[in-house]
Image (tube, rainbow, N blue to C red):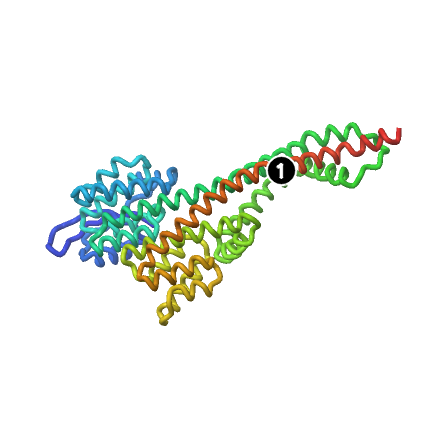
């Protein structure tokens, strides 16, 4: 998407200016007319602008957005006008990419654009969920409350992701270290051992395999590593494709131990987002769709879309969620209770809190369990290679 500087006339005949991001000038014209503005002049801003350079270097994290939302709500509650609040925070936030985006958004708001419309120009910072909630808050006249809920939602999402990351980081780091150790042994240690083997000694099969792999790696390392890099790149690209992502999401749920952890984190994210969207006044179907997308899991997205279609046909909320087979019985039962009492958001808040606590508990348990398990794995890999290398020496000693 390119950035454009525009000059337009509003309904009262005043000339307003601002910036927009769109795929082309026609997109800018369409958005301006939707805002009730008559475009007079549109110029494309070259991609060497401040935001274009900063957004490649700085990623806006959930913590940054959570803090911004909370500060924004506090300033609006104090009676500070929207444009001034956004402009002030653009000077206060520490993330340069977010600062540049807010600065341009403040200019667009001053030019007659709504807050949610201004944020749409930065999809790599503000998600559809964030923009939809801001739009709902503007429509309902409770933008401060919506921003507060957004701040809480983002903070919960951050804590949930941190818990998952802490559970997965240790085994991944240990396995990566083990792979580095194995390659170092194949490059440097195996050739030393080969020099000790008498030429007429029959090598055991494990030793032959290790020596052959070491010779192959040393002879063709300049081919092996690029091929390995291309393989990992292709695997990552496939995982990002729609087909690959669907298969990967199914595999994640079936993983031993970690599958249950991932499923609980997905359910917690779904419940928290569903509750937040309903509390801001969005219809159930739209709230379901937004909650499914917020999880990032294609299985949950499909289940949410299918549930929305059945709800439009007259079904209750809990029945299609239960039929999907993805959500635990506790979730569907709580939704059913929420439908009966007319307070689904409160029930979903309780579900989210329960599963978030479950994820935190599982994370602590997995960390204490994985540490000795990883040591055993490294011991087996390294020890197995050393035993295979020492086998010929033991054979010679036995013959002597």
Please provide percent x and percent y for residue 95: 33, 37
Up-down: is 81 above or below 12? above
Q: Quadrant of residue 315?
A: bottom left
Point out the residue furthest to the bottom here. 313
Circle 1 crowding by C-alpha within 10 Å: few under 14, some 14–19, many from 20: few
Please provide percent x and percent y for residue 246: 50, 57
- The residue at the point 31 percent across, 43 percent down is 46
Please provide percent x and percent y for residue 3: 29, 47
Return the residue nearer the eye: 400 or 111: 400
Q: Quadrant of residue 27?
A: bottom left
Return the residue nearer the eye: 271 or 298: 271
- The residue at the point 70 percent across, 30 percent down is 189
> As drawn, is 359 to the left or to the right of 59?
right
Task: Count numbered badges in the picture.
Answer: 1
Q: Which residue is mark 1?
A: 222
Please provide percent x and percent y for residue 2: 32, 49
- The residue at the point 31 percent across, 57 percent down is 278
- The residue at the point 45 percent across, 63 percent down is 322
Up-down: is 208 above or below 318? above
Helix, strand or loop at disc 1?
A: helix
């Amino acid at each position: 998407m390119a950035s454009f500087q525009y000059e337009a006339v509003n309904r009262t005949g005043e000339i307003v200016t601002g910036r927009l991001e769109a795929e082309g000038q026609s997109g800018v014209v369409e958005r301006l007319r939707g805002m009730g503005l008559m475009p007079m002049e549109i110029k494309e801003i070259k991609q060497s602008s401040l935001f274009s350079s900063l957004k490649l270097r700085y990623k806006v994290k959930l913590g940054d957005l959570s803090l911004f939302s909370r500060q924004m709500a506090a300033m609006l509650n104090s009676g500070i006008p929207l444009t001034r609040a956004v402009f002030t925070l653009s000077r206060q936030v520490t993330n340069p990419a977010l600062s540049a985006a807010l600065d341009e958004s403040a200019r667009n708001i001053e030019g007659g654009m709504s807050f949610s419309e201004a944020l749409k120009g930065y999809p790599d910072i503000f998600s559809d969920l964030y923009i939809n909630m801001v739009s709902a808050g503007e429509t309902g006249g409770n933008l401060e409350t919506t921003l507060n809920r957004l701040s809480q939602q983002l903070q919960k999402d951050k804590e949930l992701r941190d818990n998952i990351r802490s559970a997965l980081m240790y085994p991944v780091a240990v396995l990566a270290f083990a792979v580095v150790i194995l390659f170092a042994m194949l490059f440097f240690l195996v050739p030393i051992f080969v020099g000790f083997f008498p030429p007429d000694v029959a090598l055991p099969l494990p030793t032959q395999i290790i020596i052959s792999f070491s010779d192959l790696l040393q002879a063709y390392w300049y081919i092996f590593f690029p091929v390995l890099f291309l393989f990992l790149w292709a695997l990552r690209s496939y995982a990002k494709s729609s087909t690959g992502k669907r298969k990967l999401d199914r595999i994640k749920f079936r993983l031993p131990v970690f599958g249950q952890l991932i499923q609980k984190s997905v359910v917690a994210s779904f419940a928290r987002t569903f509750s937040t969207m309903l509390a801001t006044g969005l219809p159930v179907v739209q709230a379901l769709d937004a909650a499914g997308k917020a999880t990032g899991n294609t299985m949950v997205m499909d289940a949410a879309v299918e549930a929305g279609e059945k709800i439009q046909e007259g079904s209750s909320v809990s029945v299609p969620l239960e039929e999907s087979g993805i959500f635990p019985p506790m979730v569907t039962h709580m939704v059913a209770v929420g439908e009966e009492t007319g307070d689904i958001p409160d029930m979903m808040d309780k579900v989210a809190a329960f599963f978030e606590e479950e994820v935190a508990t599982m994370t602590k348990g997995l960390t204490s369990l994985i540490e000795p398990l990883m040591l055993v794995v490294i011991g087996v890999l390294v020890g197995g290679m050393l035993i295979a290398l020492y086998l010929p020496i033991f054979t010679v000693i036995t013959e002597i």
